[in-house]
Amino acid sequence: MKKIIQQYFTFNKREAREVLVLAFLIVAFLGFNWGISFVEFENIQVLNSKDSIEIQAFYDALEEEEAKPYLNRLDQFIVNLYDSIDLFDFDPNISSINTFMKLGLTEKQAKNISNYRDRGGRFFKKEDFRKIYSIRNKQYQILKPYIKIKSSKKFEKKTAEFKTEVELFEFNPNTISFDSLKLLGIRDYHAKRVISYREKVTSFKQKSDLLKVYGFDTLQYSNLEAFIQLPNEYIAPVIHYDLNSIEAKALMKVFEIEAKFAYRIVNYRNKLGGFYSKNQVFEVYEIESALVDALIVDIDLAGNNYKKININASSEELIKHPYIWKKNISRIEQFKLQNKQFNSILEIEQSGVFLPKEWAKIKPYLTVD
């Protein structure tokens, strides 16, 4: 054992020097590493802290980006529109059509608000403004901070004072004098504009033309409307459009519907054989719900003006119908092989050819005659 130890642990002078140098380097390295920890520890901790803050900020930004609501093309158009509009406070109970249009509303939207007020409608709180069917939610959210509604009592008091302090009488806006306009409670500058409008622009052809006079708001007009007399007043004819017969170009011109949606509505209607409900327009590919809401309010739908299919006849028409699938055709053919034909609508329903949800949609289009 002693010989083995001497053999492996006895060094000559050269080896002894190398071992000492190696031991010195190991001790120096350990000492340097131990010392540097005191010098750089604080800085390293600060650096790590900064890194943590930056990393956390990065993840927070990602979460915020993911939390942002998706904007469809129409909402994005509204956001872009209001980037170029200087908004201001307004009261929807007394603002004019021109004022609403300056706030980014379309003429149709402004007229919808005016019609709502003319029928006795009143905005009591900001949320009531959203109830106007053509106002989109994104548009309402942008305008909401600027809606300033006066109290109902103050509004009624102002209206009552207007009626009691002036003498209302029948008048023709094309012939009434400046002084007589003042007797009606119209302020000087509005009276001058009425006379200037009929002399320099055109005569008043219908009562509502008074609203074309700059600054003449709907509150003032509603108090005077019953007293306006126009012997040859032009009354625009009311044209009723049927959803089952209107063409795409008319949808574009009359209802301001984008061309691609107008043609999709007509094409889908033709595939169905006509609509039996206005709500079927919601099924048109990628159509905006707000667009459909506005359309179904303004357009008529003639009853039973859609095509029925004889389920006992050829299957060609059945195959082409959007509400009928291949599985339904297969079941129909199987039923006919066993029973020859369907004898009633009730028999079709009870046969199991269509599932309950399918039957609710296809029932109006089927007949056994």
Image: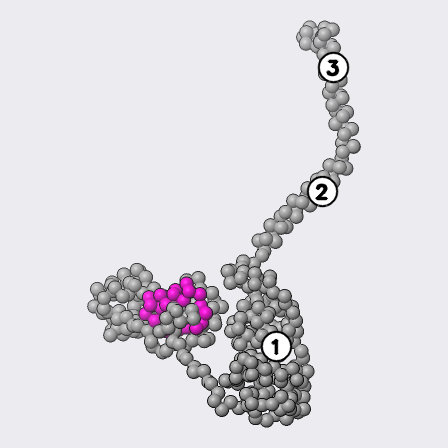
Q: Residue at x 35, y 65 (%)?
A: 267
Q: Mark 1 = which residue? A: 95
Q: Considering depth in this image, is 366 or 339 the residue closer to the camera?
A: 366
The quarter of the image holding the C terminus is bottom left
Ranked by sequence position, the earlier of labels 2 and 1 is 2
The answer to whether residue 264 is magenta is yes
Q: Residue at x 59, y 93 (%)?
A: 169
The answer to whether residue 331 is magenta is no
Q: Which residues are magenta?
A: 254-279
CA gap between label 2 and label 1 equals: 56 Å
Q: Mark 3 = which residue? A: 21
Residue 236, compared with residue 25, is above or below; it is below
Q: Considering depth in this image, is 34 or 157 the residue closer to the camera?
A: 157
Do callouts 1 and 3 mark residues in contact (Cβ within 8 Å)?
no
3 or 2: mark nearer the eye: 2
Q: Mark 2 = which residue? A: 49
Do callouts 3 and 2 mark residues in contact (Cβ within 8 Å)?
no
Q: Residue at x 38, y 68 (%)?
A: 248
Residue 227, compared with residue 284, is above or below; it is below
**What type is the residue that disc 1 sits on?**
Ser
CA gap between label 1 and label 3 equals: 95 Å
Confirm whether residue 217 shows in the render: no
